[in-house]
Image (tube, rainbow, N blue to C red):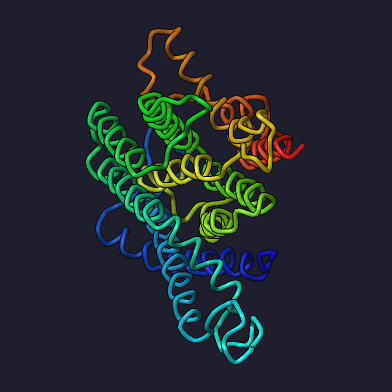
């Protein structure tokens, strides 16, 4: 069967609404607790801005996932089997929220991916918490990196791993941990202008969702659409004028989720025997990864620690070329969408 497209839409819209509706409440809470970004060096805002974006995105993702699981469970209980029963009733004759065949399909997918989904959600929460600690207490780089390393290792241990055709468990662990660390920090680095990180995250999540949907990986596609919807729900509060920021908590969360989305789909399979397809994640994430490589090499060449921020990112260079900040962000979005689109060729 083909997966019902309206369920993809439901995943996107539910996460969008949850993020958009919860953000004002989280913004007030951040203001009361002092979790704000104060004006200062390399910052253009002249008043404190709440670091509420990560809270809204994580809330939206949790509510959308929980709602989807509950809907599938209730539908399964009410709708019966996807196959004809002893009375000769045809598939779809049940009373479920979803038609029985779709319900059974989702139940199977959730059972198959249950351990991975639990590990991913707890990994996302842990990465968010690490970023929140950094927002609150400005962790030392070694402490923050150590936390990222531990979280990435635990996720790899859950079975969410990259293989790259190499039959070695040690290699699989190493490359998966390196990938999660790289993409997480790439998005953390890209959170330097209003809407840049969240917009890029939404574009990349959308492209991962499309790729998974085209390959019939409905659960991965739905999860990616939830991430896309949550980021789109936050984006109006962050672009073009920001009334809330992602903060390190939010940028860590976005980077981690995109790293995992690149691992979950099987870009190479018996049905899609094109070894070049493993390059798809690199194309979809080319802009944040390219920016990370550029600034790290540049800081290394001038003898500056790679973890100390500066204004040499692509966005800053475009502004120095004469673009407004809004134009620079929009251009980077367009580049990311175009380069990621090559993955579908």
Is residue 138 toward the left or the right of residue 278 in the image?
A: left
Question: What residue do we see at 47% from left, 33% from top?
Answer: 162
Which is nearer the eye, 69 or 305? 69
Q: Give the image location of residue 222, x and y in percent.
A: 56, 59
Question: What residue do we see at 36% from left, 38% from top?
Answer: 156
Which is nearer the eye, 37 or 7? 7
Q: Give the image location of residue 333, x and y in percent.
A: 65, 41
> Would you say residue 161 is visible in this rendering?
yes
**Residue at the right extreme, as displayed:** 345
Q: In which quarter of the view is residue 141 placed?
A: top left
Q: In which quarter of the view is residue 317 placed?
A: top right
> Would you say residue 50 is visible in this rendering?
no
Question: What residue do we see at 67% from left, 69% from top?
Answer: 4
Q: Give the image location of residue 292, x and y in percent.
A: 50, 25
Q: Give the image location of residue 94, x and y in percent.
A: 58, 87
Which is nearer the eye, 305 or 270? 270
Is residue 206 toward the left or the right of residue 106 in the image?
A: right
Which is nearer the eye, 344 or 140? 344
Question: What residue do we see at 58% from left, 27% from top?
Answer: 314
**Residue at the front extreme, as displayed:** 86
């Amino acid at each position: 069967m083909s997966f019902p497209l309206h369920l993809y839409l439901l995943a996107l819209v539910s996460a969008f609404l949850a993020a958009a509706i919860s953000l004002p409440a989280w913004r007030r809470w951040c203001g009361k607790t002092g979790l704000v970004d104060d004006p200062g060096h390399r910052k253009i805002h002249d008043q404190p801005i709440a670091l509420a974006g990560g809270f809204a995105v994580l809330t939206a993702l949790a509510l959308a996932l929980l709602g989807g699981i509950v809907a599938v469970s209730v539908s399964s209980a009410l709708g019966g089997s996807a196959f004809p029963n002893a009375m000769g009733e045809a598939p779809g004759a049940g009373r479920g929220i979803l038609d029985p065949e779709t319900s059974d399909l989702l139940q199977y997918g959730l059972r198959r991916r249950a351990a991975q989904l639990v590990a991913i959600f707890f990994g996302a929460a842990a990465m968010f918490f690490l970023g929140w600690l950094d927002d609150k207490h400005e962790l030392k780089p070694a402490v923050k990196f150590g936390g990222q390393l531990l979280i990435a290792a635990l996720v790899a241990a859950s079975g969410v791993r990259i293989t790259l055709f190499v039959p070695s468990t040690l290699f699989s662990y190493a490359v998966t941990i390196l990938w999660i660390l790289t993409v997480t920090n790439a998005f953390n680095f890209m959170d330097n202008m209003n809407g840049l990180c969240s917009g890029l995250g939404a574009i990349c999540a959308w492209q991962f969702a499309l790729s998974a949907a085209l390959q019939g990986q409905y659960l991965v596609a739905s999860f990616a659409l939830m991430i896309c919807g949550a980021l789109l729900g936050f984006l109006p509060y962050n672009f073009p004028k920001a009334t809330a920021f992602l903060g390190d908590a939010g940028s860590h969360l976005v980077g981690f989720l995109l790293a995992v989305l690149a691992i979950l789909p099987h870009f190479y399979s018996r049905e899609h025997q094109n070894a070049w397809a493993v390059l798809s994640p690199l194309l979809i994430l080319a802009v944040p990864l390219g920016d990370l490589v550029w600034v790290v090499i540049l800081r290394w060449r001038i003898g500056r620690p790679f973890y100390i921020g500066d204004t040499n990112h692509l966005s800053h260079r475009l502004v120095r070329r004469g673009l407004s900040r809004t134009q620079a962000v929009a251009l980077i979005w367009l580049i990311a969408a175009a380069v990621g689109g090559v993955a579908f060729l």
